[in-house]
């Protein structure tokens, strides 16, 4: 299995109400040398999290113990810029399993879906409701239901649906990446090859 199965996620959330967060801000280019999906979480938002002397920037949300959880809530146009898949790796390795925004860059969205991070795109109005709920109570929780394709603000019961490619939804439900999916249907592939004349 490539990553944990995704069913229903109930968690607090970390707010990052900044628009146009690009992949170089998510994981700076100097940290792209590794080829395995490990260790990238240490450098998630590295230049926003740390000063040049490696001391934490106290005003950055990931350094604020008030906020925690497996859901990252970003501003509009999250994941823009270069196509580096390491940005999704960094988010997953840090511990996030869901990113919420009112708009995602397409390549970033697909990179997330490939490695087990669910990108939930909501309307701008609902995104503001989420930010408001966190501001009111940092311990408020959210429920992300993949099967029903809905996200709910538990404190208000307000909810909204989200779209996801059916193939990617099935993969996330099973914890499959693309290779796992093919291995899972190996018998069907072999039978098709045997039954199909050259």
Image (cartoon, rainbow, N blue to C red):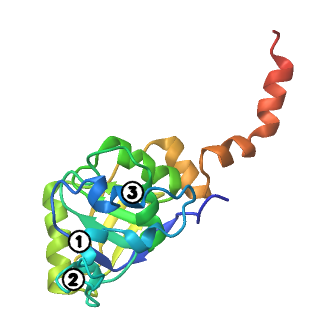
Q: Which is nearer the N-term, disc 3 or disc 2?
A: 2
Nearer the camera: disc 3 or disc 1: 1
For the residues marked 3 and 2, what is the alpha-carbon distance in whole angstroms? 21 Å
Q: Is residue 133 visible?
A: yes
Dot 2: element: loop
Q: Where's the N terminus, which quadrant?
A: bottom right
Say which mark, if any, is on residue 84.
none
Name the residue at 30% across, 81% down: 54
32 and 142: which is toward the camera = 32
Q: Which residue is denoted by mark 2 in the rendering? A: 57
Q: Which residue is denoted by mark 3 in the rendering? A: 87
> What percent of the width, then of the height, locates residue 17?
16, 67
For the residues marked 3 and 1, what is the alpha-carbon distance in whole angstroms? 14 Å
> What percent of the width, then of the height, locates residue 105?
29, 45
Farthest right residue?
A: 194
Question: Label 1 neighbourhood size at 10 Å, few (<14), some (14-19), many (20+)?
Answer: some
Dot 1: element: helix
Q: Are marks 3 and 1 in contact (CB under 8 Å)?
A: no
> What percent of the width, then of the height, locates residue 30?
37, 59
Number of callouts: 3
Whether 89 is drawn above or below 83: the answer is below
For the residues marked 2 and 1, what is the alpha-carbon distance in whole angstroms? 7 Å
Q: Which residue is denoted by mark 1 in the rendering? A: 48
Nearer the camera: disc 3 or disc 2: 2
């Amino acid at each position: 299995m490539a990553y944990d199965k995704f069913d229903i996620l109930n968690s607090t959330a970390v707010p990052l109400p900044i628009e146009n967060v690009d992949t170089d801000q998510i994981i700076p280019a100097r940290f792209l040398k590794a080829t395995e999906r490990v260790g990238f979480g240490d450098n998630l938002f590295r230049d926003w999290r740390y000063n040049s002397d490696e001391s934490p920037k106290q005003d950055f949300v990931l350094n604020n113990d008030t906020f925690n959880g497996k859901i990252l809530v970003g501003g509009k146009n999250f994941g823009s810029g270069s196509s580096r898949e390491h940005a999704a790796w960094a988010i997953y390795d840090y511990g996030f399993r869901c990113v919420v925004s009112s708009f995602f860059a397409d390549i970033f969205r697909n990179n997330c879906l490939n490695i087990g991070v669910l990108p939930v795109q909501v309307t701008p109005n609902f995104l503001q409701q989420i930010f408001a709920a966190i501001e009111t109570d940092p311990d408020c929780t959210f429920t992300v239901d993949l099967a029903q394709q809905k996200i709910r603000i538990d404190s208000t019961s307000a909810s909204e649906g989200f779209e996801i490619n059916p193939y990617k939804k099935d993969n996330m439900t099973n914890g499959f990446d693309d290779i796992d999916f093919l291995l899972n249907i190996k018998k069907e592939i072999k039978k098709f090859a045997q039954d199909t004349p050259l």
